[in-house]
Amino acid sequence: MGILCAGSNHRAFDRLASIGIAPIESVGSVSNVREILEITFWSKKPNHYTGFIQWRMTVTNAKSILIARAHEVDAIDVSGVKTGEAVSRTVLLVQCERFVYQQCLSLLPPTLTTSHFTRPHHRGNMDPVLIVGAGIVGLTLGQALKQKNIPFVIYERDPHPDSRGQGWAITLHWALQYIEALVPSETLQRIQDAQVDPEVARNDNGNFLFINLATGEPKFKIPPSKRWRVNREKMRRALLAGIEEHVHFDKRVDGVTFTEDGRPQLLFCNGDVEEHVAGKLVVGMEGSRSTVRRFLRPDAYRNVQLPVRFIGVAVDLTDDEVAPLRNMDPLLFQGCHPETGVYLWFSILESPANNVNGLWRVQINLSWPVKTADDEVPKTDKERLALMKKRAAGFVPFLYETVQRIPDGTPVVEVSLADWECLPWDNRDGKVTLASDAAHAMVMYRGEAANHGLLDIFHLIEAIATIYAGGDQKVAIDEYEREMRERTAPAVRLSRQACLEAHVWDQLNEGNENKPQQATENYNNRNGHGTAHESACYQPN
């Protein structure tokens, strides 16, 4: 019988203390579980995650969910202690070998004591988490830390939030469940409002489409799944709201050092003046050219350049001009020309409903393999636009005309296609770590970079919560990095593989697992990398 069914009054409880990570089914009604304000898990196994993720995903309203790993409870003092929350009812779960012992406690939560665990001081006296980079993933970590009342500061090299565009648009797909668990409901709503086409978002039944650019015929059509196609810059603004006072712009981090007592600190240089800021943990997430990564791996911090070049534009189209494109898919599609090997990516950026000029703003990107010096990207916008129009030769007429209509003077952005495989690093006893592109830069041909970054934060926030609850910092960060490295190193290779295959039509045959792998094997062998052992799957960028 679940504990919510115990007793005669059937009251819900506010706080849960679990000695061992009890299965969520042991508490009965899931609807009442969602209302818990505070949960603490005590686990004697350092890497005991069994059932923990299920709790974290279900109890979305909890202000605090902590796991104290590698700590065995020695005694329970039911006289209780006061907490920051006004609790009227607490449930104690004791996980035994064969059953879950349940006890309801009135008024105050129990004091759990161990031989090795000391309750932390008031959080106001704690050193903050120092986050380097105020991109989408860095701001998500900030939102998650605010939810848990853990101190943090974010440093961003950009002079102000709108000093440069945050890219075009991204697709949130399999990571949606994680960001829903990381940010408050009002922030999630703002992100949802940042979708590129609100009308399509209400009933999105599109496919992930890969076409023959010469004919317009589909090559692959991946069935619909839940996705949010969001404007990256608007999503950044949505995540910044509510934590502005924690974010410091125009602060370029020049290095990482340590205080005399061993705390990590960031170094800022302004001419001859040096500034040091100390914290409890440094998290580098300032992109693929990370200064923190360079500190951790000075011998191997550089990204590996792929033999492919990528350029793109954002342009405004009328209803008539965008119609044949949206007939392919209301949001996005991609394709390859069988003879030239040119790859195209198309996406809606803004609909007339949210574009100030009342037009459709769209993203058009082209990429191609580098075989000679003539395949390199020129320096000026004028030359780049001329190259885009030249590379569109042989496209099906409606696509060819779309590229040819791009107005003179349109800025043409080059995106460097390079990656970094989340190599091992010394995290200095768990005091300095990486996340997102700084930890595992990957090209966009599987559309997974931001999704992996958000999953990084889902795991990192639990490691940080453990640290601030008094857990072993190195153990917590080592476990976070182990999971991330095992997950993302193959993802980097698969994204590289997808990029290389996307320009070779004969290697795009569905079901052919040997040819697709060969391109990346050849490239890896030339560059000293391991090979991927899975076939690439094309997803939205």
Image (tube, grey):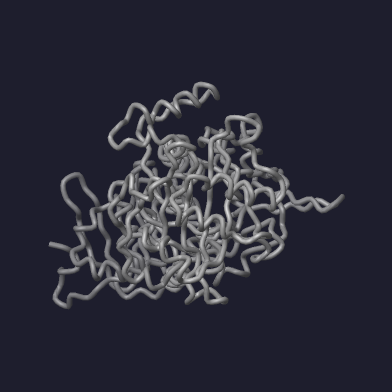
Q: Residue furthest right?
A: 272
Q: State which quarter of the image contains the N terminus.
A: bottom left
The location of residue 3, given as percent across then percent down, is 19, 65
- Compared across the picture, whether 191 is left or right of 276 comes to left
Residue at 53% across, 51% down: 365
The location of residue 17, given as percent across then percent down, is 32, 59
The location of residue 196, given as percent across then percent down, is 46, 67
Dividing the picture into quadrants, the one containing residue 536 is top left
Between 394 and 40, the residue placed more toward the observer is 394
Q: Please say whether residue 150 is visible from this viewpoint.
A: no
- Compared across the picture, whether 371 is left or right of 66 comes to right
Between 495 and 119, the residue placed more toward the observer is 495
Between 27 and 74, the residue placed more toward the observer is 27
Numbered label tally: 0
- Compared across the picture, whether 463 is left or right of 410 comes to left
Q: Tell me: residue 512, above or below residue 115.
A: above
Q: Please say whether residue 335 is visible from this viewpoint.
A: yes
Residue at 59% across, 51% down: 280
Residue at 61% across, 36% down: 375
